[in-house]
Amino acid sequence: MGTVVYPAFLHPSLLNKGTENQTKNNEIFDVCLLNLNRAQVVGFVSSIFLRRLLHPAVYNSIALRSTLEDYGKKWSDNEFQALTVDGVRREVLLLIEQEAVSGSPFLAFKCWREFCARYFDRWRKTNVAFSLLVDVLGGAVGLIRKNAISLFRSLEHMELLMYGNFEALKDFSKFGFGASNDGFEHEILFEVLRCTRVLSQQLGPAISPVFYESVVGAPMMTPEDIVARLLKTVDCRSNISMASSRMRELGTDFFQQKELADHKSLRKFSVCTVVSLRKLCKKASGWSRVLNVIECYLNLLVPRKPVEKLDSDMTLNTNISLIVQATSQVAEVMFESALDVLLFLSYLLDISGQVYMLPDDMLKIQHEFIPMVHEIIAEWLIIYFLGTMPSESLCVEDFSSQLSSLRIDCNTGRMSWTEKLGSIDFTLAFVLLLDAQGSSAAWGSLSLNCLPQPVCFPNLIQHFSGWIIWGGSGEKPLNVFGRSTHLAQSLLRHGQYNAAENLLLVLDARMRHEKLLGSLQSIDGDWCVLHHLLGCCLLARAQDEPHGSTRQKKVNESMRCYFR
């Protein structure tokens, strides 16, 4: 069982209560952000923390207000309630800038850790668990908290597999693996997953936030660059350019002790990994069989296309927010799992000579598996982004908001939910769902008629994630790029210009990469649509900028998109 209304706490990598975790994550940031200037590094780090802080399952207005008051920030009840998402961002960033007066990345990182530790302490006090909630008739199970109720859901089979609960997977054939060979394929897969987890633990828990921010944040690095830099921390724990700064921060004695401990840890990891992979290769009589199992596993990570309409009774009794939040949880797990596989495959190529890998196997990984994993990561990343990114409030000059205020379109249902734009718990997924349906009727009401059963969530999650990536079962089939441009159009119609731009930039990066690899066919039409929409986003955002070079720069960029 797993929770739906789950407190997706600030990742342990962001709290860093242990010195070992602190220094490990500092190294990850150092290696990944090596060629960026000080302002870019601070902005990158702040964006990671702020994005997680505003996660709908993490954000708590009471906890945040009491945390900010610790730093001398005071508001009346009306003033704090009037803060939009952008207002909360500005207040928190201003506080961090004031605390990290020197503007150094290390000090900014330290300030964020202290702020998140305070917030986490307030969150726990605000959401103390009181008792269990059991619906005997419906079968729902929940946890009553001081200011919320957490509902439990059944874990998907893939989640059980990723969490290492192999014993719970009785019928392994449903995963696409044969039931023959006396469970031999099972053993290969379990060993591969064990190796991916060992590599992920060696790199540290900060890898997924860093990778995520590099994709959806300011375009400073490509995902391929991030992977290459992350693997450098496994090859050599520190380098000359970082040694002097680390020595100043940690002290000479501690730095030398840590450097020696890191070297021993890295050496142990390298030897154990090579030995394990050699044994696996020998047991499978070559890498070909291992790669076949990995390919089956990768196919399981792909979001499923909706094949039929959902049962109306199931959806009507399930609140939209529960579907969105549960899907976001699964998307995060799938994204991190796919990222672990990407890092493992890339590391496998780096040590291919030590594990007796043939050139044909290396080519298969390089030209088939790695592009496939990148696409899987992009798909789950889009689902997670749309499910967790708060919507933006409409600009005063926005035409659609003026239309709604005048009630010209006479759509009171649309008016009711557009007023929620800018709320932290009203994410982009709500905008897309309600825009696609015209109302909430097809996906479940905003109020809850009864508590949903834990077992109903897997089907809802699969359907919703598939709908985001592929569209509905009755819609004209589109590729991922065509479908995502439709989603971007929907976001544009409702004034979500920044989110639409982020989504389009993710697609643009993937299309460029796949076009270079020659794995896409006839994408010129999708490419033109993408750049036209991107030009619309840039032009709309230019209106929010004050007159000057920044505004003119966005206008020029939009013109280049239109006439590219």
Image (cartoon, rainbow, N blue to C red):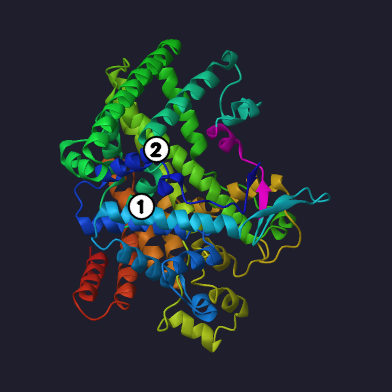
Q: Position of residue 167 (x, y in %)?
A: 63, 25
Residue 154: say if magenta.
yes
Looking at the image, residue 542 lies above or below residue 446: below
Q: Position of residue 157 (x, y in %)?
A: 61, 36
Which of the two residues, 307 or 140, is positioned nearer the viewer here? 140
Tell me which residue sits at (41%, 49%) in the image. Answer: 14
Looking at the image, residue 190 lies above or below residue 159: above
Residues in magenta, as a range: 150-163
Q: Is residue 507 visible?
A: no
The secondary element bearing badge 2 is classed as: helix
**Which mark's residue is nearer the viewer, 1 or 2?**
1
Tell me which residue sits at (66%, 42%) in the image. Answer: 154
What is the three-letter code of the residue carrying label 2?
Met
Residue 516 located left or right of residue 435: left
Tell me which label, 1 or 2, sits earlier in the chain: 1
What residue does disc 1 label? 213
What is the three-letter code of the residue carrying label 1?
Glu
Which of the two residues, 32 or 438, is positioned nearer the viewer here? 32
The secondary element bearing badge 1 is classed as: helix
> Disc 1 to disc 2, how far (Cα)?
21 Å
Looking at the image, residue 154 lies above or below residue 405: above
The local crowd at label 1, few if under 14, some if 14 to 19, many if 20 or more residues have their Cα within 10 Å, is: some
Which of the two residues, 507 or 127, is positioned nearer the viewer here? 127
Q: Dividing the picture into quarters, in which one does residue 88 lie? A: bottom left
Give the quarter of the figure containing the C terminus. bottom left
Q: Position of residue 428 (x, y in %)?
A: 49, 63
Q: Residue 372 has which mark?
A: 2
